[in-house]
Amino acid sequence: MVEERKSKNIIKDVAFRIAKATLKAIFVYLIYFLLAPLLAPLFELIPSIMESIEAFVAIYIALMIIGDVTARTIFEHIFRTARALFFMGYLLLSLGDGVINTSYQNLSLTLDLTAFTTIALSLSLLNVATSILQAINFMNEKAEAASDMQPTQSS
């Protein structure tokens, strides 16, 4: 009877995590879907950026879903760290040194985004550190729970 109740709770828990991850993914994709038409003039100036942004959104959503489905396990923290590192890598690869030069007909535009890049990378590093510390705390709690279950021997 107890095992049956545990299996039902596990199934409910996994179903809830999947539903939560799906709703979050739909929400993030809707935000992207609503913002994409607003950025259409930018996509005309830099045509290859649309595919790059689509790939970024797809990978980020996949890491987000996997992280939510693996909640309350060590893999949750691994995928959170992977998501933060992916964001940092994507930002560094797409912005490079933080200066974007583009020209359209006889108009030349130069954007210096080094301050934005620095702030975004600093926040991502903070996210990586937070994920690693949460993983350490998770493992510590698991070890404490395991040591509490072992009977103590008195002499």
Image (cartoon, rainbow, N blue to C red):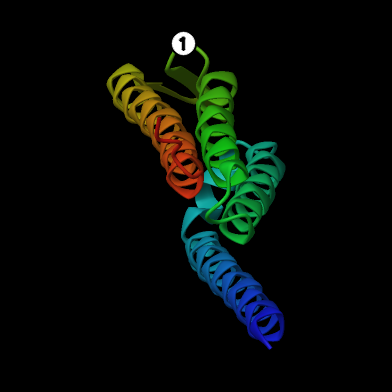
Query: In the visual, does 109 lie left or right of 122?
Result: right
Percent x, y for residue 128?
A: 43, 28
Q: Quadrant of the N terminus?
A: bottom right
Task: Please identify the quarter of the rendering in which residue 127 is found.
Answer: top left
Q: Residues within 10 Å of mark 1 (few under 14, many from 20)?
A: few
Percent x, y for residue 40?
A: 55, 55
Percent x, y for residue 58?
A: 68, 51
Task: Please identify the quarter of the rendering in which residue 12 is found.
Answer: bottom right
The amino acid type, in three-letter code, at marker 1 is: Asp
The extreme top residue here reads: 97
Q: Nearer the viewer, residue 39 or 82?
A: 82
Q: Nearer the viewer, residue 104 or 71?
A: 71
Q: Nearer the viewer, residue 120 or 101?
A: 120
Tell me the element at label 1: loop
Query: In the visual, does 80 lie left or right of 129?
Result: right
Q: Nearer the viewer, residue 8 or 150?
A: 150
User: In percent of the image, x 52 and y 50: which residue is there?
Assistant: 41
User: In percent of the image, x 66 and y 53: which residue is there?
Assistant: 66
Image position of 149 with respect to 129: above or below: below
